Image (cartoon, rainbow, N blue to C red):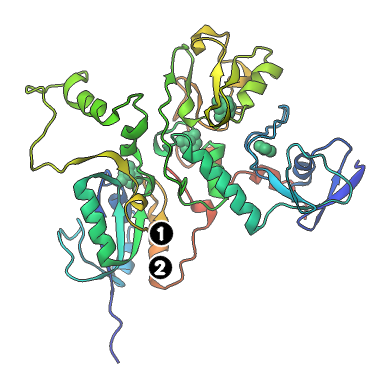
Amino acid sequence: MTELRKARVATASLAGCFGCHMAILDMDERLIDLMSKVEIDRSPLTDFKQFTRRCDIGIIEGGCCNEENVHVLQDFRRNCDVLIALGQCAIMGGLPAMRNAIMHSDAPLRECLEEAFITGRNLTNATHNIPNDPALPLLLDEVYACNEVVEIDHNIPGCAPSGDIIYDTLIKLLAGKFHGFERETIRFD
Amino acid sequence: MSDFSFMIDGVEIPACEGQTILEAADAAGIYIPRLCDHEGLRHQGSCRVCTVKANGRSVAACTQPAAPDILVENENAHINKLRRDLVEMLFHEGNHLCPICEASGNCELQAMAYRLDMTEPTQFPYLEPCRALDASHPDIALDTNRCISCGRCIRASQDVDGKGVFGYVGRGIHRRVSVNGDTLADTDAEVTDFAISSEVCPVGCIIRKREGFTTPIGEREFDKALIGHDIEEKRDD
Ligand code: SF4
Ligand code: SF4
Ligand code: SF4
Ligand code: FES
């Protein structure tokens, strides 16, 4: 009889603050239990930049604010059976999406960049230019939630989601017993 | 002391002449979700989140009078789906960034989403309107990005404060809540008005300055219990 293989999990941080990845660590000693059931493939936690093989679960933090985010997200969709949007940034754009609308401006992205690099108070920017190096990924016109770019199978809400809700969801998914959340545990912040 | 009774989801509810379905349900400890209705304010019946089926017909429970022997359906998959769609559309047509909102944790719209099992604010693409912030008043700010046009502030200012600081402007999808002056500072609004108090605006649109984020996460109203819990607690069965 062959031993059951460990589930393969990949994670990525797109337009997020890395808080959701920190929240994964909030499951504390339960990580040991989780690691007995999974192995981590492509992830900032392993520093693998590419998939070594197809994964069972992909976990995405952050939405898409630049073209690189879109490529990574599409690569995750292609290589993961189940794709999870972890946290409000991945689910609805989150804090980066502030630049989409609440700028009272017809060109919110331009206004955002100008304030960040040219007109903002307390700025030290000798060149008075908005960075435009070809090595920088091209910014999108807006910040997009993950489900506007690819199909997402599950959301784990929160900013950041608690270690409890991440652990419970993963354990139930691995056991094939995830049927949604207790509504008392849902948080949008 | 009741005049007659009717049924909600198989439970007998005593009611008095002149009570709405929602008022009778509240008194009996049955929670019917609502956003535009608020105890102490005149009923408006505009958000439709309180929709129930009375003898098979969809009615707004906050305005529909209770009647003898009607059969009311409140909680079932079909009605909850309707309510979820309404709540999603309210998220969709504003700019709701809960993680940076001072109402988060005390917000009735957000709490309604939790109660309706929503793991994301909306599945519709965001409308992302551009709406200005009015921070002209020394003690009050208005962030209409979060306004759900429930009209509670309008009724509170008119009927309780006797002022008329707020009112509707525009029609249809362009209908907005506005103030009776160029900016809020030009009105006679005061931070002590009932309309400005934390219980009137269900979301984070009417902001009392220097007050936000004082309650730590975990201790805010809807961190502790689902919306409607206070009403459901009254039920004796
Ligand atoms: S959801 Fe919150 S914690 Fe997670 S990446 Fe976004 S801002 Fe950071
Ligand atoms: S008003 Fe409520 S739903 Fe809107 S952003 Fe604030 S907490 Fe979220
Ligand atoms: S400002 Fe608040 S109370 Fe007034 S209509 Fe908007 S959401 Fe309702
Ligand atoms: S609560 Fe009844 S219509 Fe809004």
Q: Which residue in the structure is indicated by mark 2?
A: A173
Q: Relative to B157, does residue A56 appear above or below in the rendering? A: below
Residue in the image at 51% along x and 51% along y: B118
Residue B185 lies left or right of residue A49; in this view the side is right
How busy is the neighbourhood of tag 1: few (under 14 within 10 Å), some, or many (20 plus)? some
Q: Position of residue B126 (x, y in %)?
A: 42, 41
Q: Relative to A140, does residue A153 appear above or below in the rendering? A: below
Query: Which residue is the extreme one toward the bottom?
Result: A1
Residue in the image at 7% along x and 23% along y: A127
Badge 1 vs badge 2, beta-carbon distance below 8 Å? yes
Pick the front one: A4 or B218: A4
Quadrant where the N terminus of chain A sits is bottom left
Which amino acid type corresponds to the residue marked 1 in the rendered image?
Answer: His
| Chain holding disc 2 | A
Corner quadrant of residue A139: top left
Task: Report the disc number at residue A154.
Answer: 1
Residue B224: tell me if it is visible.
Answer: no
Quadrant where the C terminus of chain A sits is top left
**Mark 1 or 2: the one toward you:** 1
Per the image, label 1 sits on a secondary structure element best described as strand
Residue in the image at 38% along x and 64% along y: A170
| Chain holding disc 1 | A
Which amino acid type corresponds to the residue marked 2 in the rendered image?
Answer: Leu
Pick the front one: B137 or B133: B133
Pick the front one: A80 or A24: A80
- Which of marks 2 and 1 precedes in the sequence? 1
**Are marks 1 and 2 in one subunit?**
yes
Total marks shown come to: 2
Residue A142 lies left or right of residue B111; in this view the side is left
Residue A40 lies left or right of residue B95; in this view the side is left
Cα separation between marks 1 and 2 = 10 Å
